[in-house]
Image (spheres, grey):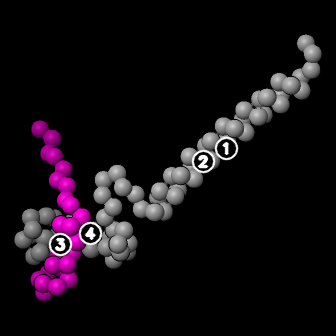
């Protein structure tokens, strides 16, 4: 039987990191008290220190940079399609009479 992956809310993650920083306990002890792996808690601490407010966007949510990248890729794809259509049209009309 497959083990189901646990998910945690952003509030839980922020509170867990705050406990590590303010409780005086070690990361391993806080992780054990919360019932999570110490590597998970360590990853959360690292994410929060690197990304700040955008650390835990949640499932399906993206950071501003990721969203901009996605939008630009869609726009590039559309422009390429339009270019290809124009190339084909020019080729058809420059062939001349059959």
Task: Determine whether label 4 and label 2 are within 8 Å by CB.
Answer: no
Front in this rendered view, residue 85 or 32 = 85
Q: Secondary structure at mark 3?
A: helix
Q: Residue at x 72, y 35 (%)?
A: 84
Q: CA distance from mark 4 to mark 2?
A: 33 Å
Q: Residue at x 11, y 75 (%)?
A: 30
Residue 22 is left or right of residue 48, and the answer is: left
User: Which label is found at residue 79?
Assistant: 1
Give the residues in magenta: 1-27
Query: Judging from the image, what secondary structure is the residue with disc 4 in?
Result: helix
Mark 1 crowdedness (10 Å alpha carbons): few <14, some 14-19, many ≥20: few
Observer-nearest residue: 37 or 12? Answer: 12
Q: Is residue 46 above or below residue 88?
A: below
Q: For residue 16, which numbered disc appears in the image?
A: 3
Label 1 and label 3: CA atoms lie apart by 46 Å
Q: Quadrant of residue 10?
A: bottom left
| Residue receiving disc 4 | 44
Say if the magenta span includes residue 96: no
Q: Mark 4 near mark 3, Cβ–Cβ under 8 Å?
A: yes
Return the mark for residue 91: none
Separation (CA) of disc 4 from disc 3 = 9 Å
Q: Earlier in the sequence, mark 1 or mark 3?
A: 3
The mark found on residue 75 in the picture is 2
Total marks placed = 4
Q: Are marks 1 and 2 in contact (CB under 8 Å)?
A: yes
Q: Position of residue 85 (x, y in %)?
A: 72, 32
Q: Left or right: 20 with respect to 76?
A: left
Relative height, residue 55 to residue 74 (above, below): below
């Amino acid at each position: 039987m497959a083990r189901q992956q646990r998910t945690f809310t952003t509030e839980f993650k922020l509170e867990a990191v705050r406990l590590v920083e303010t409780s005086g306990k070690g990361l391993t002890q806080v992780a054990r008290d919360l019932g999570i792996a110490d590597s998970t808690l360590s990853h959360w601490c690292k994410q929060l220190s690197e990304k700040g407010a955008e650390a835990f966007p949640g499932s399906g949510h993206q950071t501003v940079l990721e969203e901009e990248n996605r939008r630009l890729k869609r726009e590039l794809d559309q422009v390429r399609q339009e270019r290809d259509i124009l190339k084909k049209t020019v080729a058809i009309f420059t062939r001349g009479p059959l």
